Image (cartoon, rainbow, N blue to C red):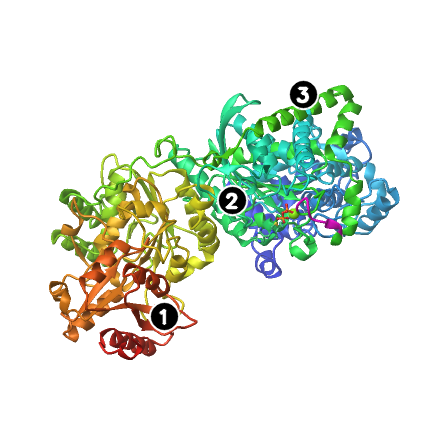
Amino acid sequence: MLNLRTCAAKLRPLTASQTVKTIYQHRPAAPRTFQQLRCYSAPVAAEPFLSGTSSNYVEEMYYAWLENPKSVHKSWDIFFRNANAGAAPGAAYQSPPPLTTSLSTLSQAQSLVQAQPNVDKLVEDHLAVQSLIRAYQIRGHHVAQLDPLGILDADLDSSLPADIITSTDKLDLAVFKERLRVLTVGGFYGLDESDLDKVFHLPTTTFIGGNESALPLREIIRRLEMAYCQHIGVEFMFINDLEQCQWIRQKFETPGIMQFTSEEKRTLLARLVRSTRFEEFLHRKWSSEKRFGLEGCEVLIPALKTIIDKSSEKGVDYVIMGMPHRGRLNVLANVIRKELEQIFCQFDSKLEAADEGSGDVKYHLGMYHRRINRVTDRNITLSLVANPSHLEAADPVVQGKTKAEQFYCGDTEGKKVMSILLHGDAAFAGQGIVYETFHLSDLPSYTTHGTVHVVVNNQIGFTTDPRMARSSPYPTDVARVVNAPIFHVNADDPEAVVYVCNVAAEWRSTFHKDVVVDLVCYRRNGHNEMDEPMFTQPLMYKQIRKQKPVLQKYAELLISQGVVNQPEYEEEIAKYDKICEEAHARSKDEKILHIKHWLDSPWPGFFTLDGQPRSMTCPSTGLNEEDLTHIGQVASSVPVEDFTIHGGLSRILKTRGEMVKNRMVDWALAEYMAFGSLLKEGIHIRLSGQDVERGTFSHRHHVLHDQNVDKRTCIPMNHLWPNQAPYTVCNSSLSEYGVLGFELGFAMASPNALVLWEAQFGDFHNTAQCIIDQFICPGQAKWVRQNGIVLLLPHGMEGMGPEHSSARPERFLQMCNDDPDVFPKLDDFDVRQLYECNWIVVNCSTPANFFHVLRRQILLPFRKPLIIFTPKSLLRHPEARSSFDDMLPGTHFLRVIPDSGPAAQNPEQVKRVLFCTGKVYYDLTRERKARQMEADVAITRVEQLSPFPFDLLQREAQKYPAAELVWCQEEHKNQGYYDYVKPRLRTTINRAKPVWYAGREPAAAPATGNKKTHLTELQRLLDTAFNLDAFKDLA
Ligand SMILES: Cc1ncc(C[n+]2csc(CCOP(=O)(O)OP(=O)(O)O)c2C)c(N)n1
Ligand SMILES: [Mg+2]
């Protein structure tokens, strides 16, 4: 095949310089072989007709001829023979007679080909027809009739492509003729009207012929119009894969392929009835409630059901969906099949909440439902992921959850679990997260093996016209970056929609790649039912008022076809209305809202049946010496044979080995110990983020690379124990929003996994702020959904400038739900306080504490997000080491590390207690030592910032009765921890004393860009911290 390609490439026209170089080459006479033919490229290329796109056509014919010379037209056979035999440039032709009007005369002509020498016109006309076919395949969608209103251009362009012979108004023969004239007679294609009845051989790149290999031009144009310019616009020619293109052409070009049985038509009508009458029912009962109805795109319901039916037929048994507001209730009712009374009761304002959760069921809560698919008679589980208002934010979350479900059921190819993402047209085009999510779609550790995207393209976003909302022709153009085919379809043609959805589902199950269905529709009402659309879209809405609902149109069609009769149709409507009425009556009995019934990811077995934790205790997070040593040894070795690692890495591993011998760990080893021990207990671990495999600071090295064999890698963590859980460590794309969303989704699927996302530098997390603000911080409060995701955010003022210093602790702390002014009434702070918080925020100062907090995350009987500010310079700081003794059984995470030096021995003498967190501790102890103030100043480390260790810090403050209390931080005053800590510290001491501040001044940027200024600032804050008179005048 490679040879074939090379050879065919030689048939392409050469550049001028290539021609000059090769044209005078010696051309030995030779038999017809690929190798030999390479020499003849110059004369062949010099044929005048071999230019531009026509060379592709010739290439195809050449392939066909090589395999069977009879498979091509006689004229081509002669041409290739001559070329192969070394004919001079321009002399390879021998002209056959022009084709006349019928197929029979075509074959006569073929037999006469050598006798009649006028082949030029024939070849040119064939090439023109080939170009024409290609033009329809590439640009036919631009003239497809996609807008049900008939007033807008789905591609925002009212002009017709210059190389398509069509008129948008099929009835206007005059327009058609004029266009034909412009494009043909002396024009683009060089054909004329008389050619319309001539028969042309069809290339292998089209299926319009069905069983025929040649057609009259008139019929070719008609069939191309049928395939590409009706209610379906297919965008696929950018796909760089012949097999995939052929597959799509076959699906849309084959004559008569879009046939529906009467049974299928009736099913489609019944689905449209449900979709339409559901909205009507809601409108009747709650006319003044917002519901973001589906009117104008009722076809979405049959569309989704088709995708699910077809996917189920192909073996999928779990579909995870994400969608925005539009039609959400309808999808819940008619696709996921949530009980109608459960939906209707949400409109009852008297509904009381039985559990926590902000109760925004109607538009945001998720759903999980297992049922039998009636069409395929197979089990199917459907899950709709809870989503915030932030459009498209749920996209990566859905993908992460899908990946996790695939991972946990061993579905490595996405044959059993798949995702469907729904989008609005404005959001799909406007939100960058869509692009980020697409870019995850083909990455080995992030692919879900194809997502079906469905766009509810109502050609408006709130009040904004598409012309003001996007620069791309279609709202779907973003999908082109991953070569996803895009099927635009007029949503008022339900059969076209269902056909396209079937093809989309088949595409996904065949190629396991993303695909987009663009439902071009309209929005019958305003953005919500209370909005007046005429303020801003008067003409569009005048048209919409005239628009017959799709159900009515389709019912009339089926009645006219005799597929159903009027009474049957009315009965179908009455049947569904009755279902709604009965459910409505039952819904009045629902007095209590159980938000836990709206979970998208139940964790069976993890909670009690009431959804409570199975205990309120946490065992010791320590580990036995044997396991510590074993993990340490694997972490410092290469556990496979004949594997050469980099010399520098050998030294790192050797140092690790020595540390293990000395029963010590640094940061990287502590992480190894935590991960390795959890893997032994069957906990899957997934660490994802930019460059996490090595670690941004080159400290981790979880993936070893053979220096001699390309792409040969080894992950020692997966060589720890015989039956261990798998460890996934994956460098991500350069995205935060997308990847953090993905990992959050991954962590949703199971409580028995430790899922960590590491920011390259903590600063960068703010690109993913939406995931933090909308999901991680309030997820449980809003949606009663726990999540144990861990964020590793490198943080610290190290003179690297404003961009690489701060993970913005102040923001995370500001979003903690503990009350600064109330000392919690708890008998157990260790676990109970964690249970009540919205997330845990820590800044560890020792590797052992880092080890414990990671293990605690899994050993807790519930799940909370964990934010860890991780160190940079401490990764290699000689004092930032821990002994195995601090990690043995019985040890645990220390929320506070009290001073243990001379100050603690004589607490009454202590003049000042410095409270701090993280790396500044090492600066403070160094300075204290230098000033010989170890007996005067105690240093207390707050390791768990939130929930705030009120109990332990109260003890610390009381221990030093004569001491001033100072919060010391290296961050600027308006940043870091001060604003969070100060009121809480004051609460612990009943506001009996002030809490002073030692740290940098307030500032707009997180850090100075000047190294010297950085050091000056540091010295100044240390001076304040140890100047016992610093606050005298302020007291
Ligand atoms: C990220 C984000 N920005 C702004 C909004 C406010 N908003 C809600 S709906 C909407 C228009 C959405 O248009 P489209 O995506 O076409 O969906 P449609 O409502 O037309 O179905 C906007 C701007 C939002 N929800 N999310
Ligand atoms: Mg819209």
Whole-percent x and y of residue 2? 50, 43
Under mark 2, the amino acid is: Asn
Q: Earlier in the sequence, mark 1 or mark 3?
A: 3
Q: Can you see residue 310?
A: no
Q: Is residue 915 visible?
A: yes
Q: Which of the pair 10/721 is nearer the observer?
A: 721
The amino acid type found where label 1 is placed reads: His
Residue 974 at x, y percent in the picture: 39, 68
Location of residue 780 in the rendering, given as x and y in whole percent from the top left corner: 42, 44
Mark 1 crowdedness (10 Å alpha carbons): few <14, some 14-19, many ≥20: many
Name the side, left or right, on which 1012 lies relative to 257: left
Quadrant of the rendered image containing residue 548 = top right
| Image: magenta residue range | 528-534
Q: Residue 681 in the image: state x and y as whole percent.
A: 25, 37
Q: Is residue 819 above or below residue 144?
A: below
Q: Nearer the viewer, mark 1 or mark 3?
A: 1
Tell me which label, 2 or 3, sits earlier in the chain.
3
Q: Is mark 1 within 8 Å of ligand 1?
A: no
Rounded to the nearest angstrom, the CA distance separating label 1 from label 3 is 71 Å
Q: Circle 2 is placed at which residue position? A: 387
Three-letter code for the amino acid on which mark 3 is drawn: Glu
Q: Which mark is residue 160?
A: none
Residue 263 — which label?
Answer: 3
- Position of residue 319 in the picture relative to residue 636 (left or right): right
Q: Look at mark 1 in the image and give the residue it sits on.
A: 972
Q: Nearer the viewer, residue 1031 or 271?
A: 1031
